[in-house]
Every structure is written in structure tokens, then in C-alpha cells.
Amino acid sequence: MSFSPTPVGPPGSRSVQEQREKWERKRTRTVRALVQTEQKYCKQLQLVNTYFVEILKAKGTLRQDIRESIFSSIPSVYSVNQTLLVRLENGDLGRGFDDFCPHLHHYVTYVDNIQNASKVLALQVKKNKAFRRFKKLQESRPEFLNCKLEDLLPLPIQRIQQYKHFLRDLSENTSPDYPEFQPLSRSVKLISEVSQRIQDNARSHDNHLQLRRVQRLLKGRKTKVEAPGRWYLREGWLRTVPPKGAEVKPKMFFLFSDVLLQAKPCHPLHPTNGDKFAGQRVYPLKDCTVDKVFGHTQSQGGLLSLTFPKAKLLLMSSDQEDINDWYYSLSSAVGYVNTDTLSLSRQGARGLTREMVCLSSQLRSRSTGAHQRNGVSEQSVKVKEHGGSPEKWCV
């Protein structure tokens, strides 16, 4: 594409021409980078499709269901990208992506399966000796340039993110009255939706790992952390204030999207549970109210009051910023859980998940900052605050 030259005219016309030339240079660089990276990408897809998918299918080294679990829609992705590459090499970007986007469902299938693919591949490498030998032999071919199959499988996910940036750059440096502008703009929107799905899936997987981590921290199986639709938000030490003036005790609290879990550490010398916690009580956040009893000013710490339908909880911290972060986190989680039914009917499950992803990321970012201020890592939950008095340990 080239913009029409601007004739010599009144003052200011030269600056318009210079801007157009700048757009043209940026666009040319983007097109060149897009074509070159697409050529490399298609070669890498061909390696996976030819030396793994097709040969494994012919040899029968893996059962069909296992093969499809690992490689998913790679053959279809490779096919549609070969067509796209031809269009890009011919300079037909707009129509090329217009024809490519209706096939993005192959990428969606791949995106939704990638975590399972990694798990199945790792299991086959560990337990299937014939496949392990086959994989090593194929990866030793010079065409692979020392790449492992594990390096190649995430490429379609990475490529979608690259397309999003390439197409945005192209649309921003293409004149709105040029024929390619509308198809490029449509493609940006469609590919951005798949990119968002990739991010949501990655965060959902990270949330799953966080739930499993907390579950492993708890003694026994009485307290169930993993539950459908539950999101991990934060964790940390707070002191519970008993209603009748007894001793203020530090407890570990785990905040999720629907419940607050209170736990106490087991005795450090216990043979199997020395690094674990015992769940004491689970407080549902539905119909909970959160109030600051004190801590509204820049004083030393604060006190929070949590009122549940069948219980009341007073939580204390000597750190002002920490209590403020807990107040914000609890209020946000309570607000979410009390409106999620309406949101679900209005947005659908994926819209609600995205909303939860945003809340989870925001709260965890705040709590990570609080941990850093206090010199405490989220994973090192056996903190010095506990004090070590024997009567506080759970055996």
C-alpha cells in the first residue's frame, strides 16, 4: 500500500505528507516482520505435523485418543496457516486475514486443550518407552535445530498474541479510506477475543494450581479447598479477637471468592504435618458484612468486624497498610459473591470468569505488595508473627 502523494499546497501540507510517509515506513516494517515470522512459524508447524502427528499415526506408537490429546488441532492449524502464508507473501493482507479468521475455532480448540496436552505429553514421556525413544530420535533431526517438542507445542498460542500486535500496528498505520483498513480492523477484534481467551485460560490454570497448593498446606482431607467456580484471592496472618476478652491469637487466613478459611499451624515437630495447617473454620461470604472498627486513619494497624449470618469475627493487625488491604480484599470478595448470580445470568459463565480473573489479579497484586512491605513471601506461610508458644500449635 502507498498513500497518495500530497501536492504542494498551503503551509502545513508538508507535515501531513511527512506523517503519511512515517505511517508507510512503519507499515512496511510491520508487513515484512509479519511475513518473515509467518514463514518461520509455518516451518515449525510443519515439523510437528510431519515428524510427529503423521508418522505417529502411521506407526501407531500412540493410541489415537492419546495422540489427539497431545496434538489436538495442529493439523488443521497448519493447513489454514499455509493458506494465510501464501496470501501474506502475495501482499494480500486484508483478504488473507478475512479468510483466516473464520477458522480461528481451530485455535480455540487448541487453546482450551493446551494444559491437558502438556500433562499427557509429560506422562507419555515418563511411562511410554517406545514414544520416548521416538521423540528423542525426531528431535535429533537437523531440521529441529535442537528444539524439543515441548518448545514447539505452545507456538500456536504465542502466534495468536503476535497476530494481535501485528494487526493493531497495521490498522493504526493504514489509512481509513484504504480497502484493507476494514478487514484488518475486523481481524484485530476477532483475534483479540482469542487472545483474551488464552489469558483467561492461563489465569484459570494458575488459580487451579493455587487451590491445589493451599489444599496441600492443610492437614488431612476434612477441609476441601478445590471447588467448582472458586478462586483463590489471598492469604496472610491476622489476629482473632475473642468475644470475651481472652487472649488475642494469630491465625492464618485464606481468602477465596466465596469463603474465608481460618487455620492454625500444626506443631513444627510433628513427623508428617510439621509444615502444614489445620483448618478450623470456613466462613461463607454470602450475606457477610465487613466493617472497620478502627484503622480509618494513619494509626498503628486496625480492627475489622466481619458479620456472618451465624457468626461474628473480629480480625486485627498491627500493620496499617495490611489491614487496609484486607478490608479492600474482603469487601471486594463479599461484593462479588453477593452479585455473582445476577452477573452470571447477564454475562454468561465466561463473562463471569473474566470478571473473577480481574478481581483475583487485582487483589493478589495488592496482597503481594503488602507481603513485600512486610518482608513476607506468600509461600512462606510459617511466619515469625506466630511466636512459637506450644499452646498455639495443633498436633
Image (cartoon, grey):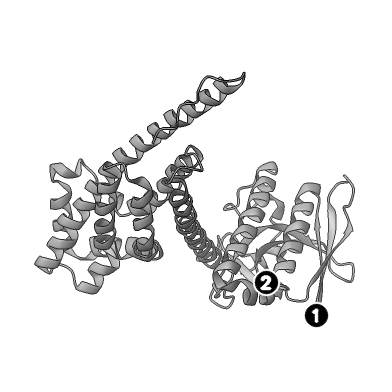
Residue 285 on image: x %, y %: 72, 73
Q: Residue at x 55, y 60 (%)?
A: 275
Q: Is residue 130 shown to the viewer in this render?
A: no
Residue for badge 1: 309
User: In the picture, residue 57 is in which quadrant?
Assistant: bottom left
In the depicted structure, whether residue 392 falls above or below residue 297: below
Residue for badge 2: 259
Camera-side residue: 55 or 311? 55
Amino acid at circle 2: Val
Instruction: Tell me the quadrant of the picture where the C terminus can be found.
Output: bottom right
Outermost residue on the bottom side: it is 310
User: In the picture, residue 270 is in which quadrant?
Assistant: bottom right
Query: Marks 2 and 1, how far apart in space?
Result: 13 Å
Amino acid at circle 1: Pro
Number of numbered discs:
2
Of the two numbered discs 2 and 1 on the same chain, state the one appearing first in sequence: 2
In the depicted structure, whether residue 260 falls above or below residue 91: below
Tell whether 227 sits left or right of 388. Answer: left
Tell whether 322 sits left or right of 98. Answer: right
Residue 243 on image: x %, y %: 87, 71
SS label for mark 1: loop
